[in-house]
Image (tube, rainbow, N blue to C red):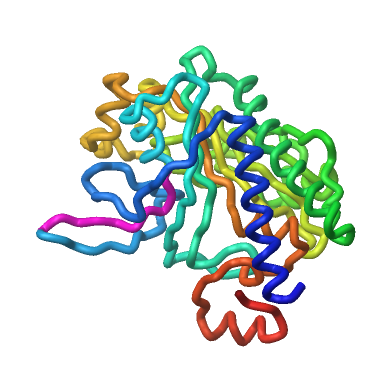
Amino acid sequence: MTYYETIMAIGAIKKDFEKEIEKKLKLTKVQSPLFVKRESGLQDDLSGVEKAVTFDKDGEQFEIVHSLAKWKRSALGKYGFPVYTGLYTDMKAIRKDEIVDATHSLYVEQWDWEQVIEEKDRNIAYLKKTVNKIYSAIRNTSLKVSKKYPELDLGLPEKIFFITSQKLEDLYPYYSPEEREDLITKEKRAVFMIGIGDKLKSGKVHDLRSPDYDDWNLNGDLFIYSDILGKAVEVSSMGIRVSEKSLLEQLEKSGHEERLNYTFHKKILKKELPYTIGGGIGQSRVLMLLLGKEHVASVQASSWEQKTIDELKDLSIL
């Protein structure tokens, strides 16, 4: 594709996908912040080792968001969204500690979404039901792309395959977590792995996950296999959010009880925020897959270190 064809296709894909998730999850698009106050507790600490881009204003510290996992739940309560409706937004972030490769950059673009649920919905069945809707939205959008560009058929299966991180470890005990993801996704093409953050039987975690937004027993990652890259690509991380009980348990396990002093965490304990399910869907990664691109730089208008520019001299960089 030429640059012009690529940006036209990107625009069309975003519009088609947003219509899909709006309809399937009853979401409304809203505005969202680029930065939050540190003391609010709304920052997503990801795996706990990434450092946010910060700045001071009149003696107060602000941080560029890593994601909007906590902000969305607060916003749903503030705006008074009814049960089984929700919001989504174009989340943009800077992750300065990211190791840049084919699917990672310093600049992050996500469809960050969140839906209000009831306490009785905090179970694996509801998680799977929601994952199926998101996967269906991705697949339907892919079919529209392949109709216009037949050579870009991803060949996605009609249904996504579910497996827990523990069953995956049992299946491939001598492989690393990333190798396990590649093996199962190569076989199934589209996979949702349930349960990330808590220790497995081996005593290790499949992947680090912040203890204060997802419930580690009710979350997971969605992978799609890329034949071009020869690996699984994580396109979404999502889950049912912590309850007052699981918040306390996970903060204790991770040694972060001090976060209970933040406003966000106090509201969860007092049941002042709604129960929710939510996550992020990587815009650039979805675009990469659907447009048959081999690097995120082909679909993302970002700034790149000279090292990356030199490595990708034969590739179209937006």
* Number of marks: 0
**Residue 60 lies in magenta, yes or no?**
yes
In magenta, the rendered stretch is 59-68
Who is closer to the viewer here, 210 or 264?
Answer: 264
Q: Is residue 215 visible?
A: no
Who is closer to the viewer here, 284 or 38?
Answer: 284
Residue at left 52%, top 40%? 279
Residue at left 46%, top 27%? 276
* Left or right of 20 in this view: 68: left
Classify residue 149 by image quadrant.
bottom right
* Left or right of 288 in this view: 251: left
**Residue 121 lies in magenta, yes or no?**
no
Whole-percent x, y for residue 70 in the image: 38, 39
Whole-percent x, y for residue 281 in the image: 58, 47
Who is closer to the viewer here, 174 or 152?
Answer: 152
| Image height of 81 relative to 71, above or below | above
| Image height of 19 relative to 274, above or below | below
Quadrant containing the N terminus is: bottom right
Residue at left 39%, top 36%? 212
Quadrant containing the C terminus is: bottom right
